[in-house]
Image (cartoon, grey):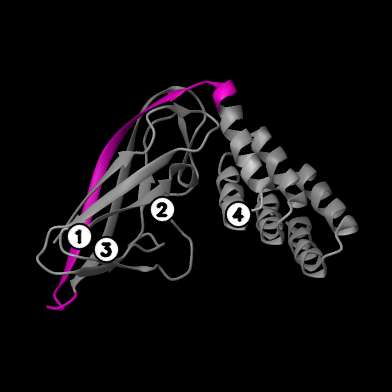
Amino acid sequence: MLQGHFKLSDSYIVVGAPIFILFEYRNTSQEAVLFSIGHGLSDGFRCTSEDAGFSIVRRGSDLGGLAPEIHLLSGQSGSQTILLNTYLQPHQAGSYIVDCKVDFDVSGEKSGSTQHVHFADSIKLDVHDDPAYASKVMAELRKDIRGANPAQGREAVSIVATLGTSEAQTVLIEALTAKELTVVEAAIDCVAQLESSEAELALAKFIETTTVRSLKKRAKEVLGRMQQQ
């Protein structure tokens, strides 16, 4: 009913830069199908590795919210992009194996029949130590954060938040002064996850200087939780 496989989006992988994996799928049945790839351990993507060159961020996706329903005509293909850094974080150069898995139910639109599918692939990653390239990627993300496209800015903030480097922390703190308010709101939540004295000071300064009441309130709530931990 459905074919699927995982593959690397880019061949050049660098410590301190985002790593994207594609899950590509194709409807091989004679009818349109419906399915959702969720956010939980049982119905979402899982990316793991036994290699010591990775730090485990989480064993599987633990995000809430409803997963969008995907409608795929007979013979039609599609894909979803996975940010590997939300699961595993490479902290040194080397060659590694990442195991990617997903399970979900697929239903025929006309027949109503349901099939539980499981896809798994082992992907080889050759991770390089290239600070200049990582900084170039970060510069592009910083540009998106400072730009006029709020959706692009929010996505850049969420990507930077997964990288775990000192430069990423600096970029997230800078994002508190972005032009688009929804980007600033995303930055407030991500800065809170840094759990550092620099992050607390940045939020305190933001609270003192911002004139946007909703953002000031949000930052106060986040800072209060940080200080209670």
Instruction: Kindly identify which numbered label has been placed on residue 60.
Output: 2
Q: Closer to the N terminus: mark 3 or mark 1? A: 3
Q: Amino acid at mark 1?
A: Val
Region in magenta: 109-133
Do the numbered discs 3 and 1 sit on residues whose CB atoms are within 8 Å? yes
**Is residue 113 found inside the magenta-colored segment of the image?**
yes
Q: Closer to the N terminus: mark 4 or mark 2? A: 2
What residue do we see at 37% from left, 59% from top? 41
- Quarter of the picture containing the C terminus is bottom right
Q: Is residue 41 left or right of residue 72?
A: right
Q: Identify the element where label 2 is drawn.
A: loop
Task: Give the label, 2 or 1, closer to the camera.
Answer: 1
Q: Amino acid at mark 4?
A: Arg
Q: Quadrant of residue 216?
A: bottom right
Q: Where does residue 65 sit, x and y in percent of width and height?
A: 47, 69
- Mark 2 residue crowding within 10 angstroms, few (<14) / some (14–19) / many (20+): many
Task: Give the label, 4 or 3, closer to the camera.
Answer: 4
Mark 1 lies on residue: 117
- Mark 4 residue crowding within 10 angstroms, few (<14) / some (14–19) / many (20+): many
